[in-house]
Every structure is written in structure tokens, then in C-alpha cells.
């Protein structure tokens, strides 16, 4: 029987800590952390995410502001909004919800965000800092995975971590974090992706398996060995025979869980951690300590 890693409970614990940090920052420096969110277009999933992010800010005492713009908004208008927030000292974190409409160049928008306010950790400066081990904003989902690993006592030191997925948001940063020579790192990391031949031959070697592919149930019991720790980053909406939909992971929980030492469920695993780490990053930005 695997230990089920309770991401919901750990995220609540982090939010409590953030709430205390917000109060301490107000008491010591008179600063109220502020997060500004930009949502362009009407993607239903993005609307839910942005609303939840703002709601969680309110819960811990972070001031938040959502600016909603139609899908027809030009790139220049988006850049103008970002620059206005860059110049506003009451804004400590800037989040432009992705994906953006096709006519807007995502890279140009991300690069326009001041690195010191880039709480998503997507700016090339923060990506570069992560790569060479300098302080900087770490993307929220990989940062949340490290917290899950740390707070459940999983030993990464010398372990073989196999990452399936190479996205800029999850795969690349988590592979970097796990390889770093520091606590909750120092793992031997293998990165697999859609070009990998014989995926199972790699995943079967994993002490720690991170599935961040975006394909429902691609990892089955045949892909893992006994005693593996499994972190499932998948958030796939699948249709059930009765016509309803449900959220499910990249891991086939039913066949993997019996072999695993520990495993994250979907939902209530990695998902809740992402927003908790966004709040943590926003307070870090407001503290001014990251780039001092
Ligand atoms: N879209 C999906 N995940 C994310 C995220 O972590 N940040 C932003 N800005 N957009 C997203």
C-alpha cells in the first residue's frame, strides 16, 4: 500500500505559513504584497485558474487585481499593461495567464515582465538563474513538487529521478531542481519526452518518477518498479462512458499505486501546490529579499 501524498493538506499548511509571512511583512515594513493578474480571452479553464488564484490571495492577505481583456486585444496593449505594472511599486507580482491568443507572442510578453516581479518564474533571466543555481523565482509547479518531496521526507540524494516531459513550465525546471547539489536535490536525473524510444525501460529505473506529459494514464504499472515514489503532474479531463467528465492524471493510479512507496493523487496532489507556491513567490517578491 502506497503512502498517498496529500497535496491539498500540504498546500493548506503552506498557505498558513504565507499568511503569517504577510502579517510579519506588514508589521515590520508596512508592505502589503500585491499580485496583478492579466487574463486575455475567454478560455474557461484559464478563467477558473485566475479566479482561484485571486481568491487564495485574498485568504492570506495578499492584495490582488484581475484585469480581463477580450481575445481581440493587441500585443501592444498587453505589453502596455505589463509595463504599467512594472512601474507600479504596489505591484510585487505580475502574472499573465497562459495560453495567450495566437496573435500574441508569448515570449515577448514574458520577456517584458520585470524579472523581480516574475512570480511565475518564466522570464529567461529567472530560467537562467535556476539553471546555474542563483537565487530567483522558481516556477510554481516545480517548486511545489520540491515542497511535496521535502515535506513527505522523500530522500532525493543519490536517487534516480526520471522526469517524463520537457515543458518550460514543469519538465525542464524540475529536472534542474532535482539535479542541483543541495538539499532535496543531488539526484541523478533522466529526462524522457515524446522522442524517447522504449519509455518503460527508463521509467522502470526510477526511484522517483515525475510524470508531466499531459496524456491521461500514459504511465501504467508496467512502467514502474516496486518502491517507486510517483509525482503525477497530469491534469487531463477525460470523458466517462456516462457522458460526464473527470480530471485525471498522467499515471494510471489503479495499476501503479500497488507498486509505489508513495504517490500523489489527481486531484488533491500537485494541483493545489501550484497556487500555494504562487502566493509564496508573491510574498518573496514583496519582501525585496530575492534580488537584494
Ligand atoms: N497556464 C497554465 N499554467 C500556468 C501557470 O502556472 N502560469 C501562467 N501564467 N499561466 C498558466
Image (tube, helix red, strand yellow):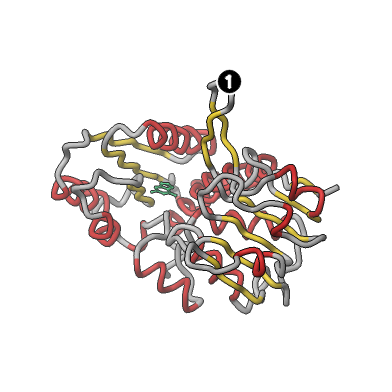
User: Considering depth in this image, is 223 or 64 the residue closer to the camera?
Assistant: 223
- Compared with 74, 54 (above or below) is above
Q: Which residue is mark 1?
A: 242
- Taking 86 as reference, is 182 above or below it? below
For the C terminus, give its image quadrant.
bottom left
- Residue at x 45%, y 60% (from the top left corner): 167
Q: Is residue 87 left or right of residue 91?
A: left
From the viewer's perspective, is residue 253 above or below residue 55? below
**Seen in the image, is 42 located left or right of residue 58?**
left
Q: Quadrant of the rendered structure where residue 159 is?
A: bottom right
Q: Quadrant of residue 110?
A: bottom left
Res. 179 image quadrant: bottom right
> Which residue is farthest top?
242
285 left or right of 185 in image: left
User: Residue 23: x, y in percent?
Assistant: 55, 44
Residue 173 versus residue 276 in the image, above or below: below
Residue at point 51%, 49% (across, down): 214
SS state under label 1: loop
One can see residue 229 in this view: yes
x and y, in percent, of residue 154 in the image: 75, 62
Is residue 205 or residue 266 the one in the foreground? 205
Amino acid at each position: 500500500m502506497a503512502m498517498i501524498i496529500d497535496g491539498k493538506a500540504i498546500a493548506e499548511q503552506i498557505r498558513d505559513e504565507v499568511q503569517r509571512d504577510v502579517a510579519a511583512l506588514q508589521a515590520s515594513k508596512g508592505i502589503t504584497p500585491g499580485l496583478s493578474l492579466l487574463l486575455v480571452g475567454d478560455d474557461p479553464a484559464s478563467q477558473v485558474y485566475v479566479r482561484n488564484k485571486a481568491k487564495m490571495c485574498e485568504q492570506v492577505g495578499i492584495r490582488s487585481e484581475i484585469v480581463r481583456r477580450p481575445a481581440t486585444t493587441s500585443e501592444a496593449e498587453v505589453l502596455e499593461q505589463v509595463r504599467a505594472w512594472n512601474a507600479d511599486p504596489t505591484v510585487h507580482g505580475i502574472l499573465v495567464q497562459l495560453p495567450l491568443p495566437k496573435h500574441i507572442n508569448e515570449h515577448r510578453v514574458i520577456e517584458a515582465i520585470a524579472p523581480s516581479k516574475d512570480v511565475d518564474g518564466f522570464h529567461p533571466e529567472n530560467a537562467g538563474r535556476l539553471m546555474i543555481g542563483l537565487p530567483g523565482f522558481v516556477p510554481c509547479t516545480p517548486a511545489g513538487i520540491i515542497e511535496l518531496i521535502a515535506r513527505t521526507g522523500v530522500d532525493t540524494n543519490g536517487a534516480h529521478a526520471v522526469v517524463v516531459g520537457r515543458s518550460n513550465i514543469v519538465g525542464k525546471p524540475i529536472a534542474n531542481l532535482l539535479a542541483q547539489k543541495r538539499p532535496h536535490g543531488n539526484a541523478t536525473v533522466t529526462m524522457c519526452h515524446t522522442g524517447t524510444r522504449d519509455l518503460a525501460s527508463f521509467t522502470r529505473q526510477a526511484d522517483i518518477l515525475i510524470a508531466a506529459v499531459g496524456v491521461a494514464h500514459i504511465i501504467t504499472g508496467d512502467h514502474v518498479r516496486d518502491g517507486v515514489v510517483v509525482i503525477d503532474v497530469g491534469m487531463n479531463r477525460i470523458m466517462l462512458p456516462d457522458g460526464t467528465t473527470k480530471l485525471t492524471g498522467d499515471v494510471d493510479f489503479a495499476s501503479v499505486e500497488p507498486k509505489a512507496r508513495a504517490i500523489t493523487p489527481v486531484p488533491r496532489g500537485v494541483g493545489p501546490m501550484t497556487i500555494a507556491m504562487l502566493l509564496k513567490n508573491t510574498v518573496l517578491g514583496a519582501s525585496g529579499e530575492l534580488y537584494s
